[in-house]
Image: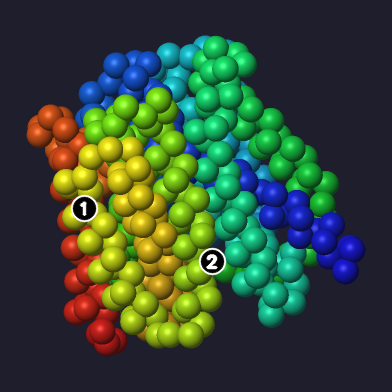
Amino acid sequence: MSNKKSVIIPVLFAFIVMGFGDIVGVITGYAKEQFALSNTVASLVPMAIFVWFLFLSVPTAVLMNKIGRKKMVNISIVLTFLGLIIPLIHFNLATFFIVCILLGIGNSIIQVALNPLLQDAAGAKGSLSSYISAGQVLKALSGASAAFMAQACINMAGSWKYMFPAYALIALIAFIWLRFTAIEETPVESDKSIAQTFVDAFKLLGNRYILYCFLGIFFVVGLDVGMNYVSPGLLAERSDMADPSFGCTVYLICKMIGAFVGAFLLSKMADRTFFKIAIIIVACALAGLFFVRGQWPVLALIGVIGFFSASVFSIIISLGINNLPEKANEISGLMIMGIVGGAIVSLLMGITADSMGSQLGSLVIIAVCVAYLALCAFVLLREKKA
């Protein structure tokens, strides 16, 4: 057992690096203020991070088959580390976007590679779900720490930019620890080229049910990234809160708690039933955000959305895979590609916020995401569609 823990713990520690992608809401708020960015330009920050899921998800899976899962995870950590140390060399708007690009590339790779590596480290498949849950907790805590980390760097070093090298140190520890941990990986044989794998994945969109699930992932990630993006702006507009980025922390902590509660409830009720209840509550909370003012009402509704939307991503992936279990690998790759929704939705939010002159424009785009998810819950994903 002690030997098993010595293998699993460094893999779980890498989930902290995976969580660096969730700091997007906090860094967008600080960058917007420091560089005097419009909402449209600020929305390019999450786009620079999440657009890479579209291009790298399937190639990562194919390359991982050839060089191994641990090497793939370590490549992602190295790329993340290189991006995070850039502010120590020079920090302006251009280098900030380079940081975001490298952070996004690293995050898209680690999202594909880390869970399979955890499966190898866990060995016994019966315990895998508990290890994945533990990893997701670490991921959520990593993202939720961003507001505190930024404020600590301002207090101690005079600038929020030092949060990047602080995270770089964590990435370095994760790389070294994992590099010198021996993990017996499950051999994978694949003679498909990247191009052929892309073709096989995209062919699945001809199945209407899979298409609906893919768009569901697109919009649920858009909702998630959108709430991270809009929370500081809403608090800045509607309250006198000293640090509006704390809204991201509230959202991520409530999302983490919601994932645990959701995992328990999903063992007691059907996926679709839970999906319907959750999306109704999310829609009501979002409607409230169009009207409420004041620090605590806004934070409360942000927290409700984070809590009840936390399990929707997992439900949609589960419904898609269960529809065609014999195509689980291709469906998983396709669903991860849907994470690009975080890039596109955030860009649309920035454009509409500028055109309307307030964050109400951002909420309109999030409402579109929630409307599609409600359509999935009550109509599109009711039964299998060929």
Q: Nearer the viewer, residue 105 or 122?
A: 122
Relative side of 18 to 3, left or right: left
Task: Quadrant for the C terminus, please.
Answer: bottom left
Q: Which residue is mark 1?
A: 288
Relative side of 140 to 307, left or right: right
What amino acid is found at the position of numbered circle 2 in the picture? Phe
Q: Image point 57% across, 17% down: which residue?
A: 155
The answer to whether residue 304 of the structure is visible from this angle is yes
In the image, residue 271 sits, relative to residue 211, either above or below, namely: below
Task: Tell me how far mark 2 sits from mark 1, CA to CA.
Answer: 25 Å
Q: Image point 80% across, 58% down: which residue?
A: 7
SS of the residue under disc 2: helix
Relative side of 354 to 316, left or right: left
Q: Which residue is mark 2?
A: 260
Res. 86 mark: none
Measuring from the top left, give residue 135's x and y in whole percent.
Answer: 63, 58
First in residue order: circle 2 vs circle 1: 2
